[in-house]
């Protein structure tokens, strides 16, 4: 039968693709692990979770969760919003959260999204047309790349952190386009290096039609005097046109936000498809995010300890002779070939540290790595043991 023949060809295609991935050491499977606070259990093995984005240890803080559940308004303890926000999903807690965000950042307004992926893949197509040029850092996150692919504007990816090239591109093209949007992350998700946002602000201020879009997924909660991110740390919150971040990492929740001008917010509400055509996050999640954001400035001790622990790990990796451009809690140990990263990760796991290999296409070919993602829940003894283990297993 024709139909079954087609379907067997298709099956064959998928099988072949999986085989190729496996041969390149890039086949991915879903890890089966059981969570126990900052630990993960797999089989007999109990490992310290060094792959979580719970940077302040808020997601695993059960005392905090109990306080939230004890104090929350019953009307917010709903596990579904049952609709898009443009229909009946716009519960009052959403307005409260967005007001809080705007107040914290001192901006006119804020808008939340179901996730960082929705945010990036939705905003970029919405704010661009065929007369827009997007200039994005080469290493931006997949959600930003997908946003670029969905937009009708032109785009150029500039060499990572190379602002000379960026300025050359702006000089060359700013007259040909009605708008140029510079897109970057503040803390880069795979290398942990930090963007000098001030430099970008100075650059964009030289041109009337250049805008700045910053994703603080790994900066929010962790950096700045009140935990508002790298933009707060570098004193340029108000100079960024689209200041974005997620709630799923340091903020121990789910969702994402942009803080921006009121006019931009109203535009986004009308144009961002992953905002319009999706069920709003459940009110209980929004209430939890608000509960944590209200307390964010109190956790300076956690931020300071995280910075200290990260600095110790970075020093260790440099002492091992590895190049490491990280300036944050994301600390890669670059090993090159995927197989090497897989082997090293397995070895670290046997020694009680749950660290995962990161391989292409997440990172460029030949830069497979272990990606340590530290949280403030790690103790001084644990970080020392991690460093000792890394040194003992080097070149084995
Ligand atoms: C994790 C991440 C996202 C996606 O956020 P989610 O809320 O997990 O969908 C977006 N941008 C960057 C830079 C990220 O690291």
Image: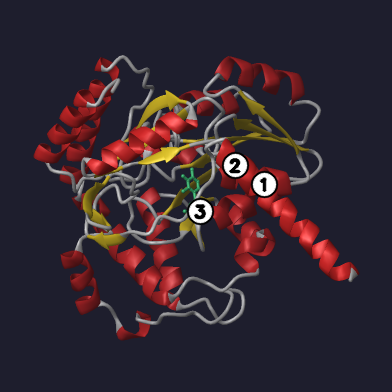
* Residue 58 versus residue 351 in the image, above or below: below
Q: Are marks 2 and 1 in contact (CB under 8 Å)?
A: yes
Q: Do the residues labelled 2 and 3 touch (CB within 8 Å)?
A: no
Describe residue 391's horizontal placement relative to residue 17 as left or right.
left
Q: Do the residues labelled 3 and 1 touch (CB within 8 Å)?
A: no
Q: How far apart are marks 2 and 3 (CA)?
A: 27 Å
The x and y percentages for residue 132 are 75, 38
Name the mark on residue 17: 1
- Name the secondary structure under disc 1: helix
Q: How crowded is mark 2: few (under 14 residues within 10 Å), some or many (20 or more)?
A: few
* Residue 286 versus residue 190 in the image, above or below: below
Residue at 62% across / 17% down in the picture? 165
Give the quarter of the figure containing the N terminus.
bottom right
- Between label 2 and label 3, give the one nearer the viewer: 2
Q: Which of marks 2 and 3 is nearer the N terminus?
A: 2
Describe residue 150's horizontal placement relative to residue 384 as left or right.
right
Return the residue nearer the eye: 197 or 42.
42
The x and y percentages for residue 176 are 81, 28
Residue at mark 2: 21
- Between label 3 and label 1, give the one nearer the viewer: 1
Q: Residues within 10 Å of mark 3 (few under 14, many from 20)?
A: many
The x and y percentages for residue 31 are 40, 55
Q: In the current view of this chain or complex, which residue is farthest to the left?
A: 381
Q: Earlier in the sequence, mark 3 or mark 1?
A: 1
Return the residue nearer the eye: 273 or 374.
374
Name the mark on residue 116: 3
């Amino acid at each position: 039968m024709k139909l079954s023949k087609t379907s067997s060809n298709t099956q064959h295609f998928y099988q072949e693709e999986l085989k190729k991935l496996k041969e390149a050491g890039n086949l991915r499977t879903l890890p089966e692990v059981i969570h126990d606070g900052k630990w993960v259990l797999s089989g007999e093995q109990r490992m310290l979770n060094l792959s979580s984005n719970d940077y302040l240890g808020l997601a695993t803080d059960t005392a905090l969760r109990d306080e939230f559940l004890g104090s929350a308004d019953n009307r917010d303890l709903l596990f579904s919003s049952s609709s898009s926000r443009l229909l009946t999903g716009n519960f009052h807690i959403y307005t409260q959260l967005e007001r809080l965000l705007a107040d914290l950042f001192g901006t006119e307004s804020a808008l939340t999204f179901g996730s960082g992926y929705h945010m990036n893949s939705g905003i970029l197509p919405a704010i661009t047309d065929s007369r827009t040029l997007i200039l994005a850092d080469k290493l931006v996150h997949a959600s930003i790349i997908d946003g670029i692919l969905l937009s009708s504007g032109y785009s150029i990816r500039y060499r990572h952190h190379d602002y000379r090239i960026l300025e050359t591109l702006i000089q060359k093209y700013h007259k040909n386009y009605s708008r140029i949007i510079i897109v970057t992350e503040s803390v880069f998700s795979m290398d942990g290096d930090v963007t000098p946002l001030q430099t970008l602000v100075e650059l964009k201020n030289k041109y009337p039609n250049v805008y700045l879009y910053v994703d603080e997924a790994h900066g929010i909660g962790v950096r700045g005097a009140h935990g508002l991110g790298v933009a707060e740390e570098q004193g340029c919150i108000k100079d960024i046109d689209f200041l974005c971040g997620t709630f799923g990492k340091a903020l121990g929740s789910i969702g994402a936000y942009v803080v921006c001008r009121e006019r931009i917010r109203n535009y986004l509400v009308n144009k961002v498809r992953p905002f319009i055509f999706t069920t709003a996050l459940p009110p209980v999640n929004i209430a939890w995010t608000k509960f944590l954001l209200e307390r964010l400035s109190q956790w300076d001790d956690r931020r300071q300890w995280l910075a200290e622990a990260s600095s110790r790990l970075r020093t260790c990796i440099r002492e091992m002779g590895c190049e490491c451009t990280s300036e944050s809690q994301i600390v890669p140990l670059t090993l090159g070939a995927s197989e090497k990263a897989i082997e090293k990760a397995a070895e670290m796991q046997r020694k009680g540290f749950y660290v995962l290999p990161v391989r292409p296409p997440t990172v460029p070919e030949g830069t497979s790595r272990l990606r340590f993602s530290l949280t403030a829940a790690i103790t001084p003894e644990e970080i020392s043991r991690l460093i000792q283990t890394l040194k003992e297993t080097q070149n084995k």
